[in-house]
Image (cartoon, rainbow, N blue to C red):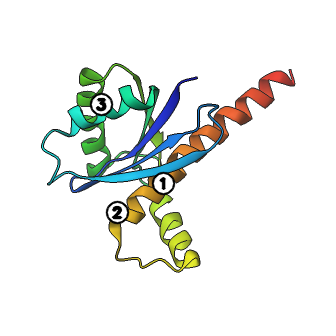
């Protein structure tokens, strides 16, 4: 089965997570340092081929009222470029409060909050797990009809 990749995009770092082959759980992947990675899209293309990814979920930052602000428009640009360069379905997914949830998780685990790459990886994992849970919920609802 194919996998789903989640991306928590940032200008400096890109957090990533990948699903298990059955699409049940999300596992964090190493964070991409965009200053050290010359071609982020080639890196992602290679990762997608290697891990047999068929769908990419990109965290879409939204304001609490659901509107898209400056950061959201930057992510929309990234999604457009990614869609042009990658042969996989790309979906924007509401990521409101995932950074707050990531920091809380890190605090509970005793991880230093200065480790920003850890925050990005956990955020990507939360984005993906929320997406996977929504797919599972939709399947349950449809099977009950």
Q: Is residue 107 above or below residue 53?
A: below
Q: Mark 2 or mark 3, which is nearer the start of the sequence?
A: 3
- Position of residue 92 measured from the top left corner of the image (x, y, whole percent): 42, 35
Report which residue position mark 2 lands on.
117
- Horizontal side of 112 relative to 143 (left or right) equals left
Q: Say few, some or many: other residues with alpha carbon within 10 Å of mark 3 (under 14 / 14 to 19 / 20 or more).
A: few
Tell me the tag on residue 119: none
Tell me the tag on residue 46: 3
Q: Mark 1 or mark 3, which is nearer the start of the sequence?
A: 3
Out of 81 and 94, give the one closest to the viewer.
81
Tell me the tag on residue 96: 1
Q: Quadrant of residue 83?
A: top left
Circles 2 and 1 in contact, beta carbons < 8 Å: no
- Horizontal side of 49 relative to 54 (left or right) equals left
- Position of residue 26 measured from the top left corner of the image (x, y, whole percent): 56, 46
Mark in the foreground, 3 or 1: 3
């Amino acid at each position: 089965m194919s996998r789903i990749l989640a991306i928590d995009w940032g200008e400096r770092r890109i957090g990533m997570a990948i699903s298990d082959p059955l699409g049940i759980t999300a596992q964090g992947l190493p964070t991409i340092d965009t200053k050290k990675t010359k071609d982020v899209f080639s890196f992602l293309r290679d990762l997608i081929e290697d891990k047999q990814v068929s769908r990419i979920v990109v965290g879409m930052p939204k304001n609490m009222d659901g509107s898209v602000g400056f950061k959201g428009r930057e992510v929309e640009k990234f999604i457009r470029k990614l869609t042009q360069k990658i042969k996989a379905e790309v979906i924007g997914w509401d990521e409101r409060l995932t950074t707050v949830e990531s920091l809380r998780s890190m605090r509970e685990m005793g991880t230093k909050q200065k480790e920003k790459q850890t925050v990005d990886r956990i955020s990507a994992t939360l984005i993906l797990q929320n997406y996977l849970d929504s797919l599972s919920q939709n399947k349950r609802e449809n099977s009950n009809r």
